[in-house]
Image (tube, rainbow, N blue to C red):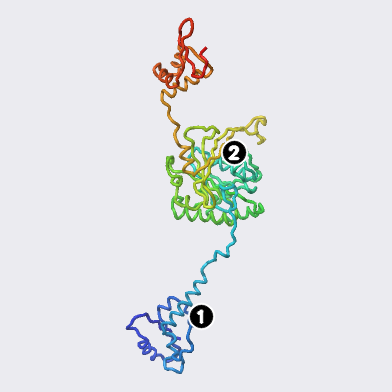
Amino acid sequence: MHIFAYPNYPDFTQASLSRVASRQLFGVIFILNLEFLKMANVNKFLFGNVDYEGDDSNPSYSSDVPGGRHNRWFDPKQIASRRNAALAQEASKLNRRTFSDVTLEPTSWLLEGLIPKGHLTALVGPPGTSKSTIACAIAAAVSQGAALLHPNIKCNKRGRVILVSNEDDIGTLAIRLTAAGADLTRVSCINAKEGKNGESPFSLANERDQNRLRGLNYHFEDNVELIILDPFQIAIEGDHANNAKARQGLESVAKFAHDLDCSILVIAHTVKNPIGKDPNARIAGAAPVREVPRSILLTGKIKSGPTESRGTHVLVQVKNNLGKTDRGFEYCVSEVDIPNLTGIGDQNTTIPSVKIVFTAERFGSAEEILQEAERPKPVKNKTDLAEEFLLTTLKNGQKPLFEIEELALLANITKGTLKLAKSNLKIKATKQKGDGRSIWSLPESPTG
């Protein structure tokens, strides 16, 4: 068999190929248009596996007509028909579904509205906002299947938690988990600093450790509900600042969360000096740290100090592809003492620790909540301080001016500032009977 292919050049005609073919002593000759050769599978074309629309009734295609058998192959309409048939067969290889074939299902949440089930979530914050302690509080809530964080943060599934850390040792984590109220029988820790039996350290970026976690989930009867990676670099092989490496690692972890139908929480840092920046711009690291997670939680400090509900920090939701981002929470870090149940030392002593206490719920966008939290506490001038001093000093009744001035001196308030505050507050001044000394009182107070 001899196959001749010719391009679509005007000076390269079928006639010129016929002269070449006349020199062949035997065999079957196929003359193919090179343009079609690129588009179609040659074997299918040669052996009739490609369906095409042809006009077999056309008398010019008959073998009884000189050159009729060749007319079919070189008719432009036939060439286009065969090309379209080949393209249609290639189109059938696309991984395509019609949306009408998709079953609509509501989003499943591990922590209602905050951490979606089967997806990747990031917890991001500056140093000193207790991100690891928050992660322990979340782990405790999942291990108990209870709303331990806040009455409005419902935990929808009780299950096993795998905590992978190269930040804190297992003893520190055990104390924090105990303080948070965790069921310690349902929380496991994997050391990411060094491997077992000389192996390389754990990394969720490689298939070996993903398969081992699949085996652990099978051992726990598919009850692993949460995996925590502290820090997120455990999910990335190589340079975590490289966009391609970070995307490859985080997308692999996101797919792993989907395959296991569990939530994965990674912990990351903010840029330096995040205050005042857009919430998304605060997230440090490669762009995929912001782009791949379905939900991103961000911590910040309350600049004006403890609120009325004792909150010193806020937790807001910067990103939520599956729900709303219109709320946040105040929290503080509370010191606690837990019983010494280790069997080591004096059993009557306690072990000091800390735990997260969510003190209040806030409403609004992440930007609004952060702006309010980071607004500096108003600086009071000397007159404001003098007015507060007089209101405090006279709240229980009138006092002689000489006594007020002595107390004001101790408070570093001058006589001039004191008189200005008196005027602003409309303080009453009366003469005391007998010695004529001045007596000051609040406007509503009796002067006697």
Q: Secondary structure at mark 2?
A: helix
Q: Which residue is mark 2?
A: 176
Q: Which residue type does callout 1 highlight? A: Asp
Which label was assigned to residue 51?
A: 1
> Label 2: few (<14), some or many (≥20) within 10 Å?
many
Left or right of 302: which side holds 9? left
Name the outermost residue toward the top: 434
Q: Nearer the viewer, residue 25 or 248?
A: 248
Name the outermost residue toward the bottom: 64
Q: Which residue type does callout 2 highlight? A: Arg
Residue 16, image x, y percentages: 35, 87
Residue 356: tell me if it is visible: no
**Quadrant hosting residue 18:** bottom left
Left or right of 378: which side holds 143? right
The nearer-to-camera label among 2 and 1 is 1
- The tag earlier along the polypeptide, 2 or 1, is 1
Which label was assigned to residue 237?
A: none
Say if 351 sits above or below 274 in the image. Answer: above
Say if 203 sits above or below 409 in the image. Answer: below
